[in-house]
């Protein structure tokens, strides 16, 4: 069995889409995989409630309680590694996890660490992607699932989806259109890694 550990910071809509797809498509039977845990750096993250309701292990590791980014990442790795065994290698999925991970953490899970970013990478890494796409006059925007490397929002692209940028779009309306695609492609990209 492969254990999937999902990291979130907020509402967890991508995490919920992954969990629902795993249940609907019976990943345990088809792929020998399960969502084993959801970890958040914020105790108020709404996604924790959904995960608990699904019977998934949850844990909160508040980054503000650590003296450095390295200390937080070391503690986070310690929690993740409880689900990482030779019989159940872990796949770490970032789903709205709003922390920049240290190179050491990324190296530890190299090839097993994936992220979703709300732009058509390599365009618009970082924050405020939707407004930046509108400001640049883009006709299309979208979402990218990629393997994580030490460089922010880079790494091998696993999947992308494209949406049009409409003349009357705001950052919020574009974000909502992109989010519907996120919920579709992220579970598919993960299933492709199992």
Image (cartoon, rainbow, N blue to C red):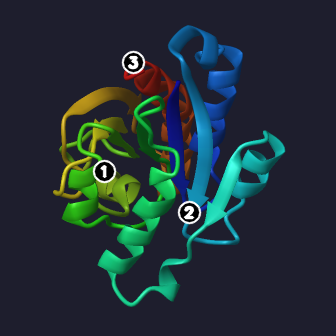
Q: Is residue 189 above or below residue 55?
A: above
Query: Which badge, 2 or 1, is on the more N-terminal residue?
Result: 2
Residue in front for this viewpoint, 20 or 76: 76
Q: Give the structural element (helix, strand or loop) at label 1.
A: helix
- Give the residue drawn at x 83%, y 45%: 53
Q: Single out the residue that lies furthest toward the front.
A: 86
Compared to 32, does 110 lie above or below?
below
What is the distance, in whole Å, between disc 3 and disc 2 at their CAs? 25 Å
Q: Which residue is mark 3?
A: 192
Single out the residue that lies furthest toward the top: 30
Relative image position of residue 180 (x, y in whole percent) = 57, 33
Who is closer to the viewer here, 40 or 3? 3
Label at residue 185:
none
Q: Position of residue 131 (x, y in %)?
A: 38, 58
Residue marked by disc 1: 133
Label located before the other in sequence (3 or 1):
1
SS at badge 2 = loop
Per the image, the residue denoted by label 2 is 9
How many other residues sit within 10 Å of disc 3, few (<14), some (14-19) or many (≥20)? few
- In three-dimensional space, the C-alpha distance between marks 2 and 1, rounded to whole angstroms, equals 24 Å
Q: Secondary structure at mark 3?
A: loop
């Amino acid at each position: 069995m492969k254990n999937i550990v999902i990291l979130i910071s907020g509402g967890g809509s991508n995490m919920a889409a992954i969990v629902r797809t795993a249940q609907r498509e019976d990943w345990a039977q088809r792929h020998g995989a399960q969502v084993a845990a959801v970890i958040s750096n914020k105790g108020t993250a709404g996604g924790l409630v959904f995960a608990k309701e699904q019977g998934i292990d949850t844990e909160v590791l508040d980054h503000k309680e650590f003296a450095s980014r390295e200390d937080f990442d070391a503690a986070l790795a310690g929690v993740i590694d409880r689900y990482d065994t030779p019989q159940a290698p872990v796949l770490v999925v970032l789903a709205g996890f709003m922390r920049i991970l240290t190179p050491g953490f990324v190296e530890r899970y190299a090839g097993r660490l994936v992220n979703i970013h709300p732009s058509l990478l390599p365009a618009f890494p970082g924050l405020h992607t939707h407004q930046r796409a509108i400001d640049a006059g883009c006709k299309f925007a979208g979402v990218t699932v990629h393997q994580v490397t030490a460089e922010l929002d880079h790494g091998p692209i696993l999947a992308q989806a494209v949406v049009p940028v409409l003349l009357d779009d705001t950052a919020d309306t574009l974000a909502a259109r992109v989010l519907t695609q996120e919920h579709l492609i992220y579970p598919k990209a993960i299933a492709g890694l199992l």
